[in-house]
């Protein structure tokens, strides 16, 4: 492994969504992340071969039965020799397993204990179920997305699970790890999707307080209410995005489109839509190439890896035959390497336990007793 987090060791308790994404981000940056999986792979989420579970890339998996006292004792041995922990269960689950903060801090006081939930560890909704769409509903984010007079569309899982969840968990873990270097003390990082999603909305709450962003979606500058910040259809049915907010960029946009400058409003939108309809997306890309008009093609998942800019930046890589986004961000000295392909649950149990000091005899006894599984049954 290589990258700025080389030497950092993290134990991840397998889950779905933001927890695995945060673990992937740390692993991408060079941390040694050990995933503790169930003996049998979870059926949660969309079923697919292991090589396509891209959020599980970059780390080894040990399959341990945490319902058995021996399994809990084994997990504690791994935690004892780690810098951080990631878990995404409902509040109280880790405590019931015997792996709560009080127990692990008594054994490893420097540990940073990362907890990923939707609603947080406390609050009226803390112990209830939910998903990304529910969490962002409570923050004002969902109500702010969409066209005027239409229902808000589910915006993938970018705002909740991955933006408000995974990124804030990874950020919180690194903040606490940095503090622990000086204090010698670990702490709990309570990362809740509802908290992070609310934080992502900070600029819009500021604009709203200033009277510059209304609660009626699709009528504001950045939500599709402006003609110069929207998406337009070309002659071939493909689309171009326009973000010419500043006047100097807008002037260049109008010049390339071949339309007279005009005040923002419905008439300008109609004129721009009509202009874009006169050429194909490829033709517009050629015309806008190198300009400051703030225009770009709307690319699909199939197209994006092949765009010249993405290719020049190396924004997409191929691991085990699967095209996927590259680790980000970039570092000038501690260069990040190619991530390890995702592996099946329990594929590295033996190697992981050996790394943590268990003997071959101990591992054999645990496997024979059904506490661990040392070979994966998963399909690639």
Image: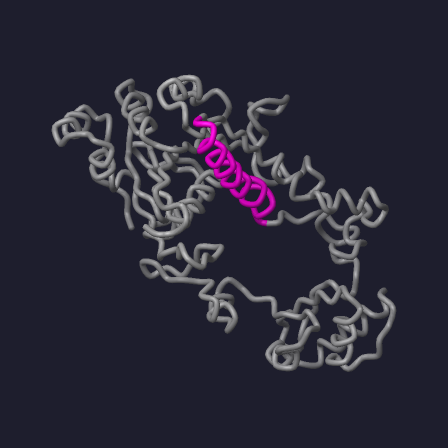
Residue 180 within the magenta-colored segment of the rendering: yes
Count of residue discs:
0
Residue 106 position (above or below residue 364): above
Quadrant in which residue 248 is drawn: bottom right
Q: Position of residue 322 (x, y in %)?
A: 37, 59
Quadrant in which residue 274 is drawn: bottom right
Q: Pick out the residue farthest to the front.
A: 182
Residue 96 within the magenta-colored segment of the rendering: no
Magenta part of the protein: which range? Answer: 156-184
Front-lying residue, 326 or 259: 326
What secondary structure predominates along the stretch shown in magenta? helix
Front-lying residue, 27 or 299: 27
Quadrant in which residue 300 is drawn: bottom right
Q: Position of residue 177 (x, y in %)?
A: 46, 35
Q: Is residue 259 left or right of residue 102?
A: right
Please tell me which residue is depicted at 57% across the width and 45% down the height of the picture.
163
Front-lying residue, 253 or 322: 253
Q: Position of residue 231 (x, y in %)?
A: 69, 65
């Amino acid at each position: 492994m290589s990258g700025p987090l080389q030497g950092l060791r993290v134990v991840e308790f397998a889950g779905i969504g933001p927890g695995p994404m945060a673990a992937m981000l740390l692993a991408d940056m060079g941390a040694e992340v050990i995933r503790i999986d169930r003996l049998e792979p979870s059926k949660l989420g969309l079923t697919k071969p292991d090589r396509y579970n891209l959020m599980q890339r970059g780390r080894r998996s040990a399959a341990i039965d945490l319902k058995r006292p021996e399994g809990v004792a084994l997990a504690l041995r791994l935690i004892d020799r780690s810098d951080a922990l990631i878990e995404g269960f409902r509040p109280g689950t880790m405590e019931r397993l015997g792996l709560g903060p009080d127990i692990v801090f008594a054994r490893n006081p420097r540990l940073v204990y990362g907890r990923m939930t939707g609603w947080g560890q406390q609050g009226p909704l803390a112990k209830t179920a939910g998903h990304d769409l529910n969490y962002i509903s409570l923050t004002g984010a969902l109500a702010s997305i969409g066209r005027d007079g239409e229902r808000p569309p589910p915006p993938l899982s970018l705002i909740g699970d991955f933006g408000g969840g995974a990124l804030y968990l990874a950020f919180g873990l690194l903040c606490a790890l940095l503090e622990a270097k000086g204090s010698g003390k670990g702490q709990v990082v309570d990362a809740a999707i509802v908290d992070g999603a609310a934080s992502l909305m900070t600029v819009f709450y500021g604009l709203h307080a200033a009277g510059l962003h209304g609660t009626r979606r699709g009528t504001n500058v950045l939500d599709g209410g402006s003609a110069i910040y929207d998406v337009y259809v070309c002659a071939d049915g493909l689309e171009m995005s326009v973000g010419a907010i500043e006047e100097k960029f807008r002037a260049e946009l109008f010049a390339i489109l071949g339309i007279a400058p005009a005040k923002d409003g419905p008439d300008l939108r109609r004129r721009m839509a009509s202009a874009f309809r006169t050429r194909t997306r490829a033709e517009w890309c050629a015309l806008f190439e190198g300009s400051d008009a703030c225009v770009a093609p709307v690319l699909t998942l199939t197209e994006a890896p092949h765009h010249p800019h993405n290719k020049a930046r190396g924004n997409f890589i191929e691991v085990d035959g699967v095209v996927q986004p590259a680790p980000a961000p970039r570092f000038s000295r501690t260069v990040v390497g190619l991530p390890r392909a995702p592996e099946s649950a329990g594929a590295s149990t033996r190697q992981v336990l050996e790394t943590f000091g268990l003997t071959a005899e101990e591992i054999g006894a645990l496997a024979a007793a059904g506490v661990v599984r040392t070979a994966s049954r998963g399909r690639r």
